Amino acid sequence: MSSSELQYTIELIGQRLIPVPNTNYTPIGIRLKTLKDRSHAWFKFDMYSFETITLEEKSYAKKHLVTHGHFFSWDEPDDLAAIIPILPKPSQRTIERYWSLETLRSEPHSVTLDVLMDLAQNLIAVAYCVTSEDNPLESDEVVCIDLRALDGDGDGVHPQAAERTLILVEMTESESDLIKTTCAKLKCCGRHIALLRSLVITNDDGRNYEWNLQIWDWKNTSKTMVTGRITPHPSENQIDFCFLGNDRLLIVTEYLEFFSIEDPSKMSPYTRFKLPLPLQCIQCLPPMDDIEQMQTQPQTVRYTPDPKHQLLCLTASYGTASLVFIISMRIFFDLDEVAETITIPWIHWGPSNTRVFWYPYRGKVHVSGNRVLQAFAISGPDARPGVYGVRLMDFSPIAGTNRQGLGRVVKDSSTIEMSPVMDDTVKEENLTITTSLPYVEVVSKRKFCVRELLDIWLDKDRIYLLNANWKHVAAGSTSYPTWESNRLEVIDV
């Protein structure tokens, strides 16, 4: 092995990356330079945009995100969806579409539950419940997922889908049960698509509540691959889930419950990790990197991040405070499968594999690979209420070891202390959390108003800020500011 090949291999190991062989030969020197350009912390962190785009998307849209250089939104009240390219690169394939979702649902008497767009697979999936024409509020007749192509005409099936429509299998004790879906979350990873629903089941014994999860291999069959109940039944804002690669699923309640997708015979976790305290308003954010393509000359070098060494982010509420858990995903891959479920206490896995941040207001956060972009409420004697700061953190081991340019290395443990909430289930000893996962941090000097900053995203080498434009009123006026439009700021880092 030549010295450059050896150095390239060391860089791959240090950044925890898996090389993807390309058919065209790319010189080792170009590959090495490409990796080195991403191994350091940031030489610049200017949070002022180089481009601002005005969006007509409503400020109260239920879902909006930026991924692969596109902005996607779903306006639930008007049942409208859109995907538009945001400053695409010359070689990038782009899609721009607008839909009234009733045109994407196969059944006329139906209500949209959730919408998913996967640009990498050219997929738009719409989950909906078909209701009775006579009494739409009484019970769901059936729940379906329609699979279409983002660039299609809206009438045909997705070219890779086994069927145009996936139909859910109901798990009830009696055919006389009345079932109503009150909340649903639709997610996809490669060939797997999953729908998690909160159900109200009404029968002669009264009302029962449960969560139901179903997973399909949508490219090979329309039959359910995995289905099961989640018990005990958490409330609607105490549960979320995400895929961890193509064969693993994580459900977040008071535990991190780890499932194998490839075993359809059961839906019980073989490992569960206890969280340090009960949480509300849980959101599970997996890393957004799939396969990155880094443009070089004259060839394209490709690599894929090792899922064992990426980050999982959980956001949640505790009382009136906001908590952000940054978790190394290596803990989900270092354990062997066991016959019986094992519950691992927080003290045995959490402190060394996580960083937990606490803020008095709801924060904004996004994860890409080993990097975290976070907007946080500023605290301290000189802080003003309702003002955000923004920081960029790199949890890659090589970033802390080979730090260059901006940023400070944080290796010391940090402890957060929270006041008890009015809940008899919370014990005093659960209110102090100490964590020590190391990272490199850069904090921006720019500040944001809480009412202005709607969301943030980190997409490889760009930052996106979704801000609301408010029509200001004169001093002394009794009227309130009104929303005019949204603006999306694009920042290179």
Image (cartoon, helix red, strand yellow):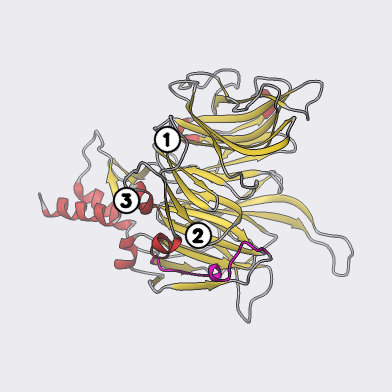
- Rounded to the nearest angstrom, the CA distance separating label 1 from label 2 is 24 Å
* Side of 364 relative to 393 (left or right): right
Does the stretch in magenta take in 426?
yes
Q: Which residue is mark 1?
A: 261
Question: Residue at 63% of width from left, 41% of height from top?
Answer: 73
Q: Earlier in the sequence, mark 3 or mark 1?
A: 1
In the rendered image, is residue 216 in sight? Answer: yes
Q: Position of residue 307 (x, y in %)?
A: 36, 47
Q: Which mark is residue 411?
A: none
Question: How far is mark 3 from mark 2, CA to CA?
Answer: 20 Å
Residue type at tag 1: Ile
Residue where numbered disc 3 is placed: 334
Secondary structure beneath disc 3?
loop
Closer to us: 257 or 186:
257
User: Which one is in front, 87 or 455?
Assistant: 455
- What amino acid does circle 2 point to? Phe
* Magenta span contains residue 235: no
Whether 295 is drawn above or below 386: the answer is above
Closer to the chain start, of discs 1 and 2, is 1
Q: Residues within 10 Å of mark 2 (few under 14, many from 20)?
A: some
Do the residues under discs 3 and 2 have CB atoms within 8 angstroms? no
User: Along the polypeptide, which appears first: circle 3 or circle 2?
Assistant: 2
Extent of the magenta region: 423-438
Seen at 30% across and 55% down, the residue is: 15
Q: Which residue is mark 2?
A: 325
Give the spatial CA distance, label 3 vs label 1: 17 Å
For the point 69% across and 66% down, the residue is 422
Q: Residue at x 30, y 62 (%)?
A: 398
Determine contact: label 3, label 1, CB under 8 Å: no
